[in-house]
């Protein structure tokens, strides 16, 4: 099995279509305005939690939850406005495969901001991106050399089917060349306090790109403040213009149990990786739940690793949504 991130999806995942089915405008606007009260427009809204209002309070709640943490790798979960629900596994840097693209998208949107629902800048596909459109060893999305695409569509093609060639195209567009863009990624990671993260590429192909669950949680928290980022990671399917194909999101949890994103990544050295975002109403207030699971079934196949990461994420989300409201109402008492 090739040691590559997000190996090409099986045939059913790419369906010939003539129409793109994106997030409905009403849903996109809901995401853009913050799904209720979290991430209010203009800043990071962190309303006081109904029970714990301090680190010790959230620790008490976390201790009372008995979450189904994965038996291997590492994981970390937090609830916006409430705090950490815990971290498991040694937080040592490990390969993260296509989870790398969260930072790629974050830097693109930071340097080239867009309005929610807008197409963004015009980007012309180069010969390299077109030549890399079809591969048997990495996930790609087809583009045509010389054709102009919207910034938004390219971000969707990078994040939804995890197109590695699109990540590299956006990096060249955003910084002149990939090396300069990688430098921006590492500068941004440092600014976010991601002390155990090193980016060596923009797509995740390089096993030398490493991070930890707690570091990726810091990035997810920052990225989800951008309404455009939230719209993109909530997109179920996206069409490749001119290629007459529609791709489904690699995040199989999307749209279930309150999940509204975020990004998958899998390779033989990295195993299965998943950053996820979900919402849950607690005491009448919508809360954003963020979680990361890394290094699941590393050393096996990307398919096996991805399945393990999805299952680990699903188990955590299901349990948190089922038990957190009561735990908060009890104030963390077991």
Image (cartoon, grey):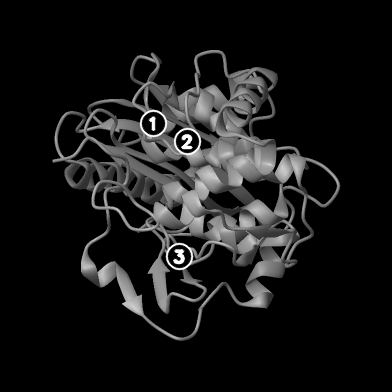
**Residue in front for this viewpoint, 248 or 27:** 248
Q: Is residue 199 left or right of residue 208?
A: right
Q: Can you say which quadrant of the picture contains the C terminus?
A: top left
Q: Is residue 97 left or right of residue 11?
A: right
- Residue at x 59% of width, y 29% of height: 218
Give the x, y percent position of residue 296.
Answer: 25, 33
The answer to whether mark 1 and mark 2 are in CB contact below 8 A is yes
Residue 153 got which mark?
none
Does label 3 or label 2 sit earlier along the sequence?
2
Give the x, y percent position of residue 200.
Answer: 47, 23
State which mark lies toward you, 3 or 2. Answer: 2
State which mark lies toward you, 1 or 3. Answer: 1
- Residue at x 59% of width, y 32% of height: 219
The residue where tag 3 is placed is 255
Residue 189 visible in the shown view: yes
The residue where tag 1 is placed is 96
Give the x, y percent position of residue 304.
Answer: 17, 44
Badge 1 marks a residue whose secondary structure is loop
Badge 2 marks a residue whose secondary structure is helix
10 Å neighbourhood of mark 2: few (<14), some, or many (≥20)?
many
The residue where tag 2 is placed is 100
Give the x, y percent position of residue 295.
Answer: 29, 29
Q: Is residue 267 left or right of residue 230?
A: left
- Distance between mark 3 and mark 2 Cα atoms: 22 Å
Residue 35 visible in the shown view: no
- Distance between mark 1 and mark 2 Cα atoms: 6 Å
């Amino acid at each position: 099995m090739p040691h590559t991130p997000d190996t090409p999806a099986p045939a059913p995942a790419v369906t010939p279509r003539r129409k793109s089915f994106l997030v409905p405008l009403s849903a996109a606007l809901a995401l853009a305005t913050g799904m209720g009260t979290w991430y209010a427009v203009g800043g990071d809204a962190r309303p006081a939690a109904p029970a714990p209002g301090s680190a010790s309070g959230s620790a008490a709640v976390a201790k009372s939850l008995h979450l189904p943490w994965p038996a291997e790798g590492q994981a970390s979960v937090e609830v916006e406005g409430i705090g950490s629900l815990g971290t498991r596994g040694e937080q040592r840097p490990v390969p993260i495969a296509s989870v790398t693209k969260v930072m790629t998208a974050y830097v693109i949107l930071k340097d080239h901001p867009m309005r929610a629902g807008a197409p963004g800048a015009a980007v012309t596909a180069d010969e390299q991106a077109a030549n890399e459109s079809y591969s048997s060893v990495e996930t790609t999305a087809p583009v045509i050399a010389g054709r102009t695409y919207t910034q938004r569509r390219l971000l969707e093609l990078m994040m939804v089917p995890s197109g590695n060639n699109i990540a590299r195209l956006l990096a060249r567009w955003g910084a002149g060349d990939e090396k300069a863009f990688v430098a921006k990624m590492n500068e941004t990671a440092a600014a976010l306090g991601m002390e155990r993260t090193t980016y060596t590429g923009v797509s995740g192909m390089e096993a030398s790109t490493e991070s930890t669950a707690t570091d990726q949680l810091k990035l997810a928290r920052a990225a989800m403040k951008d309404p455009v980022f939230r719209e993109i990671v909530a997109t179920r399917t996206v069409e490749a213009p001119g290629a007459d194909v529609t791709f489904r999101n690699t995040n199989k949890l999307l749209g279930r149990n309150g999940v509204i994103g975020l990004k998958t990544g899998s390779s033989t050295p990295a195993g299965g990786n998943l950053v996820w975002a979900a919402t849950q109403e607690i005491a009448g207030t919508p809360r954003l739940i963020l979680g990361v699971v890394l290094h699941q079934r590393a050393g096996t196949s990307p398919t096996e690793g991805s399945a393990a990461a999805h299952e680990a994420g699903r188990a955590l989300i299901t349990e948190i949504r089922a038990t957190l409201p009561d735990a908060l109402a009890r104030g963390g008492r077991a």
